[in-house]
Amino acid sequence: MKRSGRTLRQRLYGIKHIGGYLCRARYFRGHGVHSPYVYSIVRHVFMSSKLNTERTDLRDALLRLDVPKRRATELQNLVAHCDYTSWSIDTLQPCQMLIATMATTFEQLMEYADYAREQGITLCIMRPYNNAERWAVCSQIIEEHPSTSVDNRGYLLIFNNHLPKQRFRL
């Protein structure tokens, strides 16, 4: 029988720190994401704390609506990453990304989801976990839509594109 040359104390050292590893496990975003499209969004949008583009129009508009700076920056980076040229906040109009803030009613959220599906655009719902009723509506939207959804706790992205029906919770 071959011995490893490590003492029992050396072998157990990793177990001593397992609590710290488990506490930080939620920060390893991207682990387990098997979609190249979503993985690139995780790496270039969610994991970036600075603006990756010269444009700041969406970020500025969201900051005026009291959206946290981090979330506003992420959404501006998403627009740049996905090459979206137009967006709309709480208004049904031709665009590539529709953002539903906390000012939207539950009926409007369902209407926005239908509109986004018909137009093939991305729907972003801010603060999907704000209360139980809002999360129930968001869950229904996720179940009914035919493509990919990405939930990163701060907002829910509903992509209506070529991607298969998948649900990512980060």
Image (cartoon, rainbow, N blue to C red):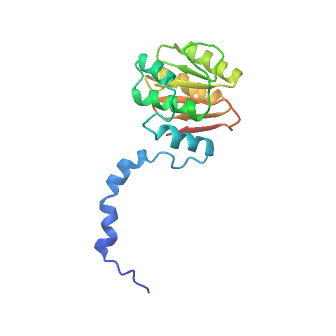
Residue 61: x %, y % from top left: 47, 18
Q: Hey, which residue is sitting farthest bottom in the picture?
A: 1
Question: Image quadrant of residue 139?
Answer: top right
Question: Image quadrant of residue 18?
Answer: bottom left
Q: How many marks?
A: 0
- The structure residue drawn at horizontal position 57% and vertical position 43%, both measured from the top left corner, is 40
Q: In this view, does 59 lie to the left or right of 12?
A: right
Q: In this view, does 66 lie to the left or right of 125?
A: left
- The structure residue drawn at horizontal position 32% and vertical position 53%, both measured from the top left corner, is 20
Q: Could you say which is closer to the camera, residue 159 or residue 14?
A: 159
Residue 161: x %, y % from top left: 69, 32
Q: Could you say which is closer to the camera, residue 135 or residue 46?
A: 46
- The structure residue drawn at horizontal position 47% and vertical position 24%, both measured from the top left corner, is 59
Position of the N terminus, as image quadrant, is: bottom left
Q: Hey, which residue is sitting farthest front in the picture?
A: 54
Residue 100: x %, y % from top left: 53, 19
- The structure residue drawn at horizontal position 48% and vertical position 20%, both measured from the top left corner, is 133
Residue 121: x %, y % from top left: 65, 25
Examine the rendered structure and indicate whether residue 133 appears above or below residue 34. above
Q: Is residue 81 left or right of residue 23?
A: right
Q: Could you say which is closer to the camera, residue 58 or residue 42?
A: 58
